[in-house]
Image: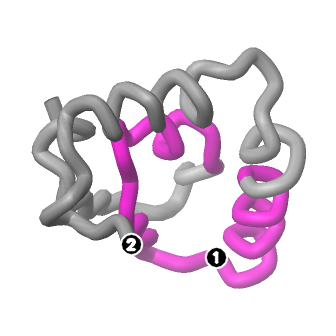
Amino acid sequence: LMDDRTFDEQTANDWIKAVESTEKSFRDTFVYPKINELISQRSPQRVLDIGCGQGVGVDRVNLANASYTGIEPSIYLLD
């Protein structure tokens, strides 16, 4: 079981290498397009990203008319 108490620096580095650093990731091909579609349909004023990691999502979603707040419990990913 992994949570914010067991998500240590090594786990954070492994996460970055496996998920955030890939050239064309699952997030790029599926997750971010779906989020952009929802934002386009709903036109929210605010977007809350729970578990934002390093915050790379803010650069991949259309926030032209919305403010963005990211929340991340891992101090290692925030660094």
List the residue tagged with mark 2: 1
Q: Nearer the viewer, mark 2 or mark 1?
A: 2
Q: Quadrant of the C terminus?
A: top left
Q: Quadrant of residue 31?
A: bottom right
How are the residues colored? one colour
Type of amino acid at the residue the image marks with label 2:
Leu
Type of amino acid at the residue the image marks with label 1:
Ser
Q: Quadrant of residue 6?
A: bottom left
Q: Residue at the spot x=30%, y=58% of the render?
A: 70
List the residue tagged with mark 1: 43
Span shown in magenta: 32-61
Tell me if mark 1 has few (under 14), some (14-19) or many (20+) residues whose alpha carbon lies within 10 angstroms of its own.
Answer: some
Q: As rendered, which of 52 and 74 lies closer to the eye? A: 74
Per the image, is 43 magenta?
yes
Mark 2 vs mark 1, CA separation in Å:
36 Å
Q: Under tag 2, what secondary structure?
A: loop
Give the image location of residue 64, x and y in percent: 56, 50
Q: Residue at the spot x=52%, y=22% of the render?
A: 17
Give the image location of residue 2, x and y in percent: 35, 66
